[in-house]
Amino acid sequence: MATLQECREALDRLSENLTRSDHDGVRGAAAFDRTLSCHVTDLDTTFAGRLSDGRITVADTRPGPPQERAQIRLAMAGDDLVALVDGELNFAKAWASGRVRLEAGFRDLLHLRKLL
């Protein structure tokens, strides 16, 4: 089971990957400004912050599910978060099987599909 620190480091690596992206479509999709939450279900902890200017900024880490409804909401086990960021888990397959939950508005989903 991934630790809280490993999950936080995975989010930081994801943010770095987004800012280093050379592909215009990915960079454009990452450049929009939205609130973001990632609930790590097996640790029952939520990272809350923003996806802005191609960077994920975690502003708060709290126990339990998200206290506020972010515009983009992710939920998954810590091991799955680490595996996704490390490229060991395919997002589409994980989402289709229910291992990863993603909730967002339709327009945001269109932007996010370029990232995932």
Image: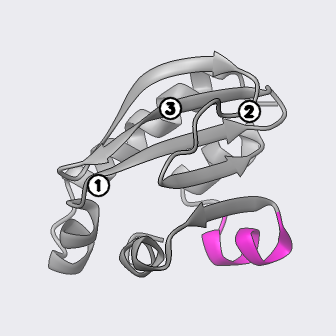
Q: Residue at x 78, y 43 (%)?
A: 77
Side of 23 where 61 appears, left or right: right
Does residue 93 sit above or below 59 in this rendering?
below
Q: Position of residue 12 (x, y in %)?
A: 40, 34
Q: Is residue 88 magenta?
A: no
**Quarter of the figure with residue 13:** top left
Which residue type does callout 1 highlight?
Leu
Q: Nearer the viewer, residue 109 or 19?
A: 109
Q: Quadrant of the N terminus?
A: top right
Report if the CB atoms under discs 3 and 1 are less than 8 Å apart. no
Sequence-wise, the earlier of marks 1 and 2 is: 1
Residue 48: numbered disc: 3
For the residues marked 2 and 3, what is the alpha-carbon distance in whole angstroms? 10 Å
Q: Residue at x 52, y 51 (%)?
A: 85
Side of 49 where 84 appears, left or right: right
Of marks 1 and 2, the one in the foreground = 2
Q: Position of residue 26 (x, y in %)?
A: 27, 72
Q: Nearer the viewer, residue 34 or 5?
A: 34
Q: Nearer the viewer, residue 2 or 53?
A: 53
- State the extent of the magenta-drawn residues as a range: 89-98
Side of 64 where 109 appears, left or right: left
Sequence-wise, the earlier of marks 2 and 3 is: 3
Residue 29: numbered disc: none
Residue designated by label 2? 65
**Quarter of the figure with residue 115:** bottom left
